[in-house]
Image (spheres, rainbow, N blue to C red):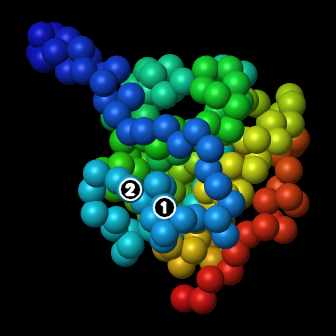
Amino acid sequence: MCLAIGLLSLDTSSMATRGFPLTNLADIDDVLDGRDTVFDINARLDRGRWSGIVIHHLGRPFGTPESIHRQHLGYGYQGLGYHFIIGNGNGLGDGEIHVGYRWDDQLPGAHVVGSAGTEHNAHSIGICLVGNGDRHPFTDRQMTHLVRLVQRLQQELRIPADAVWLHSDLAEGVHNPGRFFASGQLQEQLLDPAR
């Protein structure tokens, strides 16, 4: 058994780095030739699965896909629990989006805790901002790329504005993405695509 666990742990870094970076996400109106890199993924887009989006913060000033993957393994998850990570310049570039293996392979997330977790992990896309929103606001580039990413997901998957949540909306006692998160800025820019 120890040998099996050891062999499985050898491949954890490749699993964490599987996925791809989006270093400069253009405004939704500027997507060229109808091709959007957010949806240039390994698996076929599972439109029937995704009905919501949940915004999180890491709760730490530094984060890379590898460090978050290791942290999530320590929690007992099967690796990186978020579908997307947006960097703050400490680990990932400021505003850089890492597309995780769960999005690339269209797998459920491991990002919502509490009684709503089962439903939202299965059907909501998890986006994590590196940083701690209880201590500092997120960078302008993080917020710009968060809005652009959420709008793309909303448009492509027909996710209404009322199905874009903060983690604190779903889990009692959770202050995530934190008191300095610019929720008004996000709310003003959400789309409401017709279902």
Give percent across and percent down for residue 159.
57, 74
Residue 56 image point, x, y percent: 65, 44
Quadrant (top left, top right, bottom left, bottom right) of the C terminus: bottom right
- Establish if 165 lies above or below 104: below
Asked if residue 18 can be seen in this view, the reply is yes
Locate the N terminus by quadrant: top left
Labels 2 and 1 touching (C-beta < 8 A):
yes
Q: Give residue 94's position: percent from left, percent from top.
A: 70, 31
Residue 166 numbered tag = none
Residue flagged by tag 2: what amino acid is it? Answer: Asp
Q: Quadrant of residue 154?
A: bottom right
Q: Which residue is mark 1?
A: 36
Q: Which mark is residue 40?
A: 2
Residue 105 is left or right of residue 186, and the answer is left
From the viewer's perspective, tell me whether residue 107 is left or right of residue 66.
Answer: left
Residue name at image x 64 percent, y 32 percent? 87
Quarter holding residue 9: top left
Kindly state the secondary structure of the residue where label 1 is placed: loop
- State the count of labels: 2
